[in-house]
Image (tube, grey):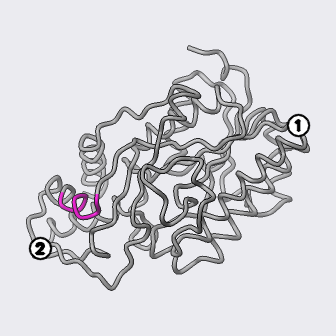
Amino acid sequence: MSNFWENRKIVVTGGAGFLGSYVLEGLQARQARYVFVPLIEEYDLTRIDDIRRMYDVMKPDLVIHLAAVVGGIGANREHPGEFFFKNLVMGIQLIEEARLRAVEKVVALGTVCAYPKFTPVPFKEDDLWNGYPEETNAPYGLAKKMLLVQSQAYRAEYGYNSIFLLPVNLYGPRDNFDPQSSHVIPALIKKCVEAVRSNAEEIVVWGTGNASREFIYAADAAEGILLAAEKYNESEPVNIGAGFEITIRDLVEKIARLTGFKGRLVWDATKPDGQPHRCLDTSRAWEKFGFKAKTNFDEGLKKTIEWYWNSTK
């Protein structure tokens, strides 16, 4: 066990959220003693005064910036301005203030939504600038991608150590199951479980089912983030993914089977598919800091479904 974490003061923005809960578990397993989570009730990280107050109080050596305003396709379509502004201003001010205070390192999280709409599969980090992101989530994706530009610019001018990671879609127990803002896996699990409980004959699913996605179990993503925080100190972005691809149609059928839903699947093709394909090349994470996702997709789905069943009894 590395002693990297033992005496460092670590701030985890978004630590009270879904991914944050797994990062905190990973830090506990690493015996990190000084971990601070700025709660939104106390610190609005879109406000510079709150960011400065957080740094004054917590005095971190390392910042892991997970906080984000996020959602699925529907939420992105309804709130493009909010998603752009809040994600951009949070990250830019956090990194700038960290630099001014000589915080040792910032780990900034981007998003797979930053990739161009028609990126060759699997997505390689070098393709990140070869086109415009898929329109429904471009404002969010571009806001996050600016943190890469900032990170690289600060390293070039100031020698400042910040790194940028690109996680693919997350899933797992404790995910957000709110139908107004959830991503595809929790949304489908909720639909199927409710249909089973109500004996519904059908569920309606957005799109054609032809788009493909990659998903990483949240505990695996947290492990990748912590390995990068400890071992990676370079300017190039790094994908954090599981390295596989599944169509939305196959995903829906799999979740229906695992939840016990036997009714009809009705596809609403008037709703958008989003980006046509998403699958990451994960070789850089392995080469640079030895990360490879471990959780089998079916096993991860079973754990997520079981958690949702039990939490909504």
Picture quadrant of residue 255: bottom left
* Residue designated by label 2: 264
Q: Residues within 10 Å of mark 2 (few under 14, many from 20)?
A: few
- Residue at image x 50%, y 66%? 117
- Residue 174 pos. (x, y %): 41, 50
* Residue designated by label 1: 102
Identify the mark nearer the N-term, 1 or 2.
1
Q: Is residue 14 above or below residue 79?
A: above
**Mark 2 residue type:** Arg
Q: Predominant secondary structure in magenta?
A: helix
59 in the magenta segment: no
- Of residue 8 and residue 154, the one placed in the foreground of this image is 154
- Residue at image x 29%, y 63%? 248
Circle 2 — which element? strand
Span colored in magenta: 247-253
Q: Is residue 27 left or right of residue 293?
A: right
- Residue 72 pos. (x, y %): 45, 68
- Residue at image x 62%, y 48%? 109
Marks 1 and 2 sit apart, C-alpha to C-alpha, by 57 Å
**Mark 1 residue type:** Ala
Give the position of the C terminus as an image quadrant: bottom left
- Residue 124 pos. (x, y %): 52, 47
